[in-house]
Image: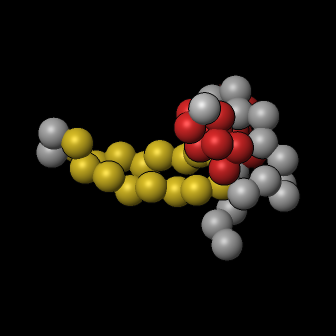
Amino acid sequence: MVTIPKAILDANNLNWNPKDDVYILFKEIDGQAGLFLFKKEDIEKSKK
C-alpha cells in the first residue's frame, strides 16, 4: 500500500477517496523520469 499525501491530491484537483484503487506507474520519457497516478475507472473510461 502507498499513502498519497492529501496536499498532493488537493493541489492536482484529484477527487479520490481513501478506498479508491489507484495505479502508480514509473516511466521515463525523453530522459525524464515521471510518476503517474491514475484510477481504475479512468482506464475503463478510456477503453470506450
The mark total stands at 0
* Quadrant hosting residue 16: top right
Residue at image coords 43%, 49%: 35
Please, which residue is most extreme toward the left here?
31
* Quadrant hosting residue 15: top right
Residue 10: percent from the left, percent from the top?
72, 32
**Closest to the observer, 18 or 5:** 18
Q: Is residue 24 above or below residue 47?
A: below
- As drawn, is 4 to the left or to the right of 27? right
Residue at image coords 16%, 39%: 30
Q: Is residue 16 above or below residue 11?
A: below
- As drawn, is 21 to the left or to the right of 46? right
* Quadrant hosting residue 45: top right
Residue 25: percent from the left, percent from the top?
45, 55
**Closest to the observer, 5 or 35:** 35
Residue at image coords 60%, 32%: 48
Report the quarter where the N terminus lies.
bottom right
Residue 11: percent from the left, percent from the top?
65, 29
**Closest to the observer, 25 or 6:** 25
Q: How is the image coloured?
A: secondary structure
Question: Is residue 8 among what the camera can see?
Answer: no
Residue 34: percent from the left, percent from the top?
35, 46
Residue at image coords 25%, 50%: 28
Please, which residue is most extreme toward the bottom here?
1
Question: Is residue 18 among what the camera can see?
Answer: yes
